[in-house]
Image: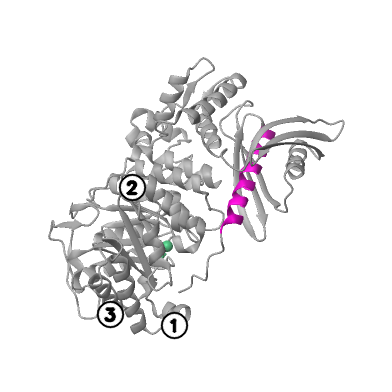
Amino acid sequence: MGRYGYDGNGLPSQIDQTEVHMTFVHPSFGQIDDSRTIIFDTTLRDGEQSPGFSMNLEEKLRMAEALADLGVDVIEAGFPVASKGDFESVSEIARIVRGAVVCALARSGGRNDIQAAGEAIAHAERGRIHNFISTSPLHMKYKLRMEPETVLEIITEGNKAARNLTDDVEWSAEDGSRTEPDFLCRCVEAAIKAGATTINIPDTVGYATPEDMEKIFAMLKARVPGADSVIFSAHNHNDLGLGVANTLASLRGGARQIECTINGIGERAGNAALEEIVMAIRTRNDQYPYTNRIVTEKLLRLSRMLATITGFDVQPNKAIVGRNAFAHESGIHQDGILKNAATYEIMTPESVGWSKTSLVMGKHSGRAAFRDKLVALGYGEMADDRLNDAFARFKDLADRKKVVYDEDIVALVDDEARDHARIRFHGLEVSSGSKRPAEATLEIEVDGEMIEASATGNGPVDAAFHAIRSAFPHDARLALYSVGAVTEGTDAQARTTVRLEEDGRLVDGQGADADTVVSAVRAYLHALNKLLVKRTRAEPEALEA
Ligand code: KIV
Ligand code: ZN
């Protein structure tokens, strides 16, 4: 790591490239070397709070367990005071997930925030409270309507209160990148004195450049008393597409915690993408000589799991996890790849989880082979009842489809995992064609009670959706219906997304099945179940402060 001087104007004057290797004793991680970076994932908090990305408890738990398995150090699980649902999901994740610190967000000056965060992480193996308040002139004047001195007092009170509940306390200067340097130093000093062990400087609005971020961290490390006793953290939004570049520059400035999300989801244009940062560090370790615990071979699996849960696929050309990230179309490139893959590939597809061939199993494959396959696909050992349900659907699919690919199994198992909700799909019969209106008869279970309903419609999907409305009357409006194929061929499974809108709230549901109409019904029911979860979620109190 380089060392920085300070020119008296709050900015570093020189960069001395002398290597220094310090060690640091962290309350959750113990003795850590200066080259070690802490990967802090906020998919379930910053990611989940963006429109259309909400997840239910079961989905959050599944993501949290997969994140811990990926090697993430800290999982920011939610904002407990925001709603009963958020409180429950943070508590459940804290109770169940092992191997990662579970973190709860709180406003430094919120009425019940820190108490709620402390209660939510009480059962964590290792728990963190992350408190924040805005420090930029713009936010203090217009959003908080507070004087800087009041903000300083709140920082002290908030961090002391958090520190009474856990040893692992993070404080964030919201809009930190647009904060006046002298005031930022005073805020950070106050937070450290009050007990914060991680100091996060977010580029909340994605305005900073890599040069800005490097300088901010270098300045804080050079100027703030006590800076050596904390970890500095980077949290970069992507409004100018600079999230990852800003994060790498923050490391150069001295940050050693990286806040990021799977697929880069998050407020507005999102947060810096975990998979891109980790692979940049791994591939260009000559420039970024830092270590982390991420098992990169599991990156694709996490990306897909999140896309399946939220219904938002990544764009085909997305780095690392996009469908085209390792696809070579032009003849010249293909020729080069065949002669030596390094000609056009800077990392191997396998290193991020793409398998060479995804052709796998058929109708003669047994339960043991299926279980092994799930482990290889990153699902770990499944409980017997879940395994049996998934295996039954696999057998059914293998009877209907000539070859079953990895992608089919992923779609099927993720779909199965969604099927533990209030409204469950049991069966569907459809007749359609050019001679008479389509007719659908649907069987669903609602809170344990079987209901059958029939309806006609303008095509089989329309008829099936009318049947859902008749079996379970509701006011939600269909806002989007889209179908894609999981693999190639006419017997490919259809993967459907359905978006429902109710009182301005949007939810997306997904379904997969070899039958397109069944896939659509599953997606519709998934969305409806999500809406029911949302309805039971209390509206957050005003969270501006
Ligand atoms: O972007 C931001 O400033 C945040 C803070 C709450 C850390 O997400
Ligand atoms: Zn953020």
Cβ–Cβ below 8 Å for labels 3 and 2?
no
Q: Nearer the viewer, residue 278 or 37?
A: 37
Question: Pointer 2: residues within 10 angstroms few (<14), some, or many (20+)?
Answer: many
Q: Amino acid at mark 1?
A: Lys
* Mark nearer the N terminus (3 vs 1): 1
Question: Pointer 3: residues within 10 angstroms few (<14), some, or many (20+)?
Answer: some
Residue picked out by circle 2: 72
Cβ–Cβ below 8 Å for labels 3 and 1?
no
* Rendered view: 263 above or below 224: above
How far apart in space, not on screen, are marks 1 and 2 (Cα)? 36 Å
Residue 141 badge: 1
Q: Left of 133 or right of it: where is 269? A: right
Taking the view exactly as shown, the residue that stands out farthest to the top is 364
Callout 1 secondary element: helix
Question: Which quadrant is home to the N terminus?
Answer: bottom left
Regarding residue 344, the answer to whether it shows in the image is no
How far apart in space, not on screen, are marks 3 and 2 (Cα)? 33 Å
Q: How many marks?
A: 3
Question: Which range is magenta?
Answer: 516-537
Residue picked out by circle 3: 182
* Mark nearer the N terminus (3 vs 2): 2
| Ligand 1 placement by image quarter | bottom left
* Rendered view: 369 above or below 305: above
Q: Amino acid at mark 2?
A: Val
* Mark nearer the N terminus (1 vs 2): 2
